Image: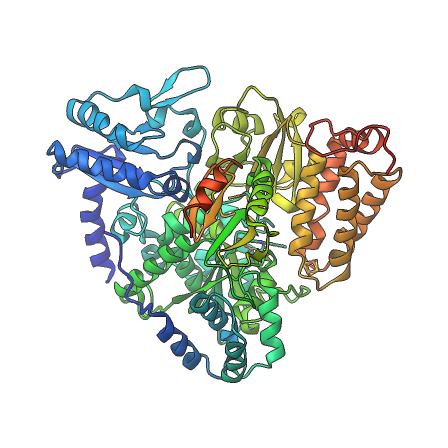
Amino acid sequence: MGAECKCNCDQEKKLDALFAQYKGNSNGLIVVMAAIQEVHGYLPKDFLVKTAEELGVPLSDVYGVATFYAAFSLRPRGRHCVNLCLGTACYVKGAPDVQTILEQEMGIKAGNTTEDRRFSLDLVRCLGACGIAPVLTVNGEVYPRMTAEKVNEILAKYE
Amino acid sequence: MNFAELELLRATAKESIKLRLGEEPSDNFKYHVLVCGGTGCLSIGCQNTLDAFQKAVDSHGLQDSVKVVVTGCMGTCEMGPVITVFPEGYYYCRVQPEDAEEIVSSHLKNGKFVERLCYHAADGSVQARKSDMTFFKKQKRNALRNCGLISQTSLEEYIAMDGYKALAKVLQGMSPQQVVDEVKKSGLRGRGGAGFPTGVKWQFVLDQQADQKYIVCNGDEGDPGAFMDRSVLEDDPYSVIEAMTIGGYAVGASKGFAYIRLEYPRAIDHYNKALCRAREVGLLGNNILGTDFSFDIEIRVGAGAFVCGEETALLASIEGRRGEPRPRPPFPAVSGLFAKPTVINNVESWANICPIIINGGDWYASMGTEKSKGTKVFTLAGKITNTGLVEIPLGLTLREMVEDIGGGVPDGKAFKAAQTGGPSGGCIPAAYLDTPIDYENLAALGSIVGSGGMIIVDEGTCMVDLAKFYLGFTQDESCGKCTPCRIGTKRMLEILERITKGLGKEGDLELLVELANSIKASALCGLGQTAPNPILSTLRYFKDEFEAHIKDKNCPAGVCKMPRKGLKS
Ligand SMILES: Cc1cc2nc3c(=O)[nH]c(=O)nc-3n(C[C@H](O)[C@H](O)[C@H](O)COP(=O)(O)O)c2cc1C
Ligand code: SF4
Ligand code: FES
């Protein structure tokens, strides 16, 4: 009996529609930038300039917002986004050990992307799944009760 | 939809869920099998269990007498995937796909429940039905009343559970002032952390003269370790939508915003679906239920900044700016979103509104303690047997929470402390287990109720390391606008990092306390003002652990990596 949403979710079109909807309106800044991030996986420079022009916001403000929020990235991300939860529940149940292994396996520190752009590794603060801590997500898929031993098995699934 | 149509829909919808409420149904179903589809259970594989179940039901030809429903979180995340079988409410835990056949053939076909899959308490006793389980016995569910009982985005099932009864009551005969009075009478205090009386806040906004006012729902839920708002938004989105609509009527606002954090994609999805549906049937938008009251809601998705949970930062973020807090006054009630009077409440606060309107403020105020009325949701997590979502009348003791509901600390380890209130809160050691949980008592102990996160730690947790974790969190999330928070917390963190590496010095603790007090006194917003709390409270109860690190270069819990004794730094 779940209700079907009738909104148009086509991404590129959505972007254009958003530019039109918020033309000259700075209130739409985050909404527009979130859509760009979603479609392109990061905020390409051209789009930041376009956003500034369309919404009538100084480019410095666009940059200010881009660097304030963790969801925005100015550089391209990896093909697979690995998010390790370092919220309290995950922390006390051993997430730091998982972090060590992940960084070792990928050869990067958290917050970075591997050379071959296979993985981006980020630390997040609580995914709201504390009951099954420690938690890891890959491209949004949730992996519960992580241990250092399970890391390789999971990473191998993503090319 | 008008009032009569709503009641008609309620009457038919109610028939289809009667069996779950212990009433005699008029349809042919003998059993309702509820499969938990909450985030916890989903990730442990409840989809496979569900598929296997559906298949088993079909292969036994029971599809006409057994209804399989996917619901939201039932609260027992540790035991997932969870299945409840009504009418009796048998509660099956950790149900694997291969268990489905047995449940169907034994229970659904021959009426014999499967004891092996029921909840087994620590003493080995079997608690087969929900009503037998100590986890549920001491709970009282208001905000979570529908979670785990109805299909997540079904408007019909929501309406069957008295959904939109409160809005109908309000629109059919209550003045805005009467609505505000009822909320005041309930004694409901904001569940987002600060605990400010909700009715008083609504009165401020009602009293303002303005051409436009706004309603905002704070669904940023940043406290790491708290996930009640997620559950309400995912599993019972209409309860928040209906309540915000009532709020709009009460204070004279025609527009609302729900700010939901990016990390909760399913909450955004479900809430959005519910919005579309409510709009479609005339429960949102112009002329709600055929009256001349109009109200609509827009979703705004957070962009990953903890500080945006702070109300002024959240409003800045909705306006498309950096989420930096600003000094108050003016409070949002006077000058909020787009400089208009604004009611901003937390998701769980909203979820309490409809029952208060239906049953009256006095009813709500009859639960809880003298100054802390009603029920509060806590998230039990960390080193505890039954992790999950728990809603209790305020005033239950910490011991009842940890031992009866939580089932104690696992692996034979000893309880060390409960950390409440997240990065703004503090810890409560074993000596205070018999304290009744309410706003006043926790504050007196140097902690807070906060948003309701409760992390249990055992003897294997180093309290200094935990304090460092929280400070690392706030330091990371500090927006950088004011100096005490930006630089002060950094200096405190550096000291703690030294201490946990065995490089602590005489005088470090005094310096920590001095820094803590000046940050508390001078930071601009709640983030900075409360950031030192975890350190101060840990110092209050576990000073010996700090001293062991500094003087003996020893971490009693064995967590911090200390240099070998005798080495000079
Ligand atoms: C740093 C900081 C973070 C906060 N995070 C949240 C949050 O995630 N959710 C929330 O409802 N309130 C949060 N608050 C509290 C809000 O500022 C505000 O008090 C609350 O939304 C009011 O709603 P209530 O009265 O219903 O609790 C936070 C406050 C501070 C200082
Ligand atoms: S206290 Fe911290 S988070 Fe709050 S305004 Fe100041 S720097 Fe920003
Ligand atoms: S602390 Fe990791 S999911 Fe909540």
Return the x and y of residue A2 as percentages of the image width and height. Answer: 26, 53
* Rendered view: B258 above or below B446: below
Residue B132 screen position, x and y as percent: 36, 23
Tell me the residue at 69%/49% (across/down): B530
Give the position of the C terminus of chain B as an image quadrant.
Answer: top right
Image point 52% across, 60% down: which residue?
B344
Colour option used:
rainbow
User: How many numbered tags mark residues here?
Assistant: 0
Which of the 4 image quadrants contains residue A90?
Answer: top right
Q: Could you tell whether A47 is left or right of B563 in the image? A: left
**Relative to the observer, which residue lies in front, A123 or B206?**
A123
Point out residue B385 in the picture as x, y percentages from the top left corner. 49, 27
Q: Nearer the viewer, residue B10 or B470?
A: B470
- Foreground residue, B404 or B55? B55
Judge from the rendering whether residue B182 lies leftward or rightward of residue B371; answer left or right.
left
Q: Residue at the front extreme?
A: A116
On screen, residue B48 versus residue B142, left or right, reads left
Residue at screen point 35% across, 43% down: B72
